[in-house]
């Protein structure tokens, strides 16, 4: 009989075979489903990876992730409840979201109708607006970091939650410089699992300035990545693909997105995408407030043009996924 893994008041939920129930693994930590024995509620517990326990840079980044997410209070951002350490291991607890990621939905159901895709992106834009209010850049906007949850008040409406602020940084930031709070520069996992300085983020969803060695980042980098996410929702894949980081990076830097592949998308949606995916930051919406207005205008254009949305314009989320 296996013993329960515990961090402070948080007990890790066991899987059917008795091992700790993992929800995912990333460059910084492992996430588990856990139970808060004090407040009697399920939570997501993120624990720093064993291989990083003696890495001061990684530890600082892990703690900054928790603090960055905790100070942004918004319905479209997963809430951080607590942060602490057990022995030499750091952890933090956050809201457990019953639902699935946008990536999972698209892999399961295929491409999304334009109206539904825009409604999801609009809620992420609201989350970015709250983050930018705290001068925080997420730096890893992608379908895997967008949770689709059910409304807790019983309406069944779609609720979008932005998760994983592991690469969040105060703006404006240059990768070549240290971040606030004594950061020693960006780190990410290489393909063989080692740590390296350099690019941070996910190449297929990265902005051109994220890829440039001394690129200056602000919220418009997140807007570009959200544009790639919208493309993914409409097409089922990002605009640029390939197994080589160098190849994908080069296309983000200099190649125009293949808009001809979205030939069935309404013109208003294509116009929005062209703005969000502008190579130069000045060609994009200046901030999430402007982006929200442009998304809302695009949604109105779809409605006035009679472009069909999902059946009933309503999505219900259950523990088994979206139905």
Image (tube, rainbow, N blue to C red):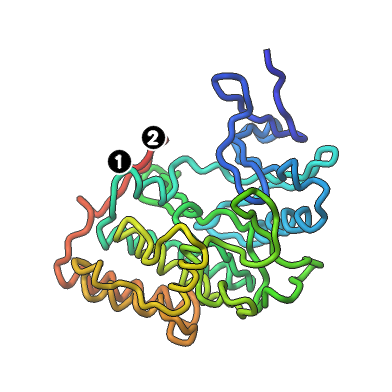
Residue 273 on image: x %, y %: 34, 74
Image quadrant occupied by the C terminus: top left
Residue 250 on image: x %, y %: 47, 73
Dot 1 falls on a residue whose secondary structure is loop
Give the residue drawn at x 47%, y 66%: 126
Q: Residue furthest top?
A: 1
Dot 2 falls on a residue whose secondary structure is loop
Q: Which residue is mark 1?
A: 323
Other residues around mark 2 within 10 Å, as few (<14) / some (14–19) / many (≥20) = few
Gap in Å between the C-alphas at discs 2 and 1? 8 Å
Look at the picture and state if 105 lies above or below 86: below
Other residues around mark 1 within 10 Å, as few (<14) / some (14–19) / many (≥20) = few
Q: Which residue is mark 2?
A: 320
Q: Which mark is residue 50?
A: none
Give the residue drawn at x 54%, y 56%: 77
Give the residue drawn at x 52%, y 74%: 221
The foreground one among 116 and 264 is 264
Residue 184 on image: x %, y %: 78, 66
The foreground one among 12 and 39 is 12
Residue 37 on image: x %, y %: 69, 30
Q: Quadrant of residue 199?
A: bottom right
């Amino acid at each position: 009989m296996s013993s329960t893994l515990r961090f402070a008041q948080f007990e890790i939920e066991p899987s059917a075979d008795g091992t700790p129930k993992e929800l995912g693994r990333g460059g910084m930590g492992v996430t588990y489903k856990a139970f808060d024995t004090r407040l009697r509620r399920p939570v997501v517990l993120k624990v720093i990876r064993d291989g990083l326990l003696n890495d001061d840079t990684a530890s600082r980044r892990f703690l900054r992730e928790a603090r960055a997410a905790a100070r942004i209070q918004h319905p479209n951002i997963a809430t951080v409840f607590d942060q602490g350490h057990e022995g030499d291991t750091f952890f933090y607890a956050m809201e457990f979201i019953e639902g699935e990621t946008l990536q999972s939905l698209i892999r399961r159901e295929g491409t999304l109708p334009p109206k539904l895709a825009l409604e999801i992106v609009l809620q992420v834009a609201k989350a970015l607006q709250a983050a930018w209010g705290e001068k925080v850049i997420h730096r890893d906007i992608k379908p895997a970091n967008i949770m689709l949850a059910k409304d807790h008040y019983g309406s069944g409406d779609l609720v979008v939650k932005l998760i994983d602020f592991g690469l969040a940084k105060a703006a404006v930031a240059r990768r070549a410089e240290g971040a606030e709070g004594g950061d020693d520069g960006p780190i990410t996992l290489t393909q063989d699992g080692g740590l390296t300085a350099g690019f941070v983020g996910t190449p297929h969803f990265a902005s051109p300035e994220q890829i440039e060695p001394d690129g200056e980042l602000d919220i418009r980098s997140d807007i570009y990545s959200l544009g790639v996410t919208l493309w993914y929702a409409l097409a089922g894949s990002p605009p640029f693909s390939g197994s080589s980081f160098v190849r994908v990076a080069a296309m983000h830097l200099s190649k125009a997105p293949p808009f001809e592949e979205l030939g069935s998308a309404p013109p208003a949606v294509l116009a929005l995408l062209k703005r969000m995916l502008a190579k130069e930051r000045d060609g994009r919406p200046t901030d999430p407030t402007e982006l929200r207005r442009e998304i809302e205008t695009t949604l109105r254009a779809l409605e006035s043009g009679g472009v069909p949305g999902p059946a009933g314009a309503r999505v219900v989320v259950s523990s088994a996924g979206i139905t």
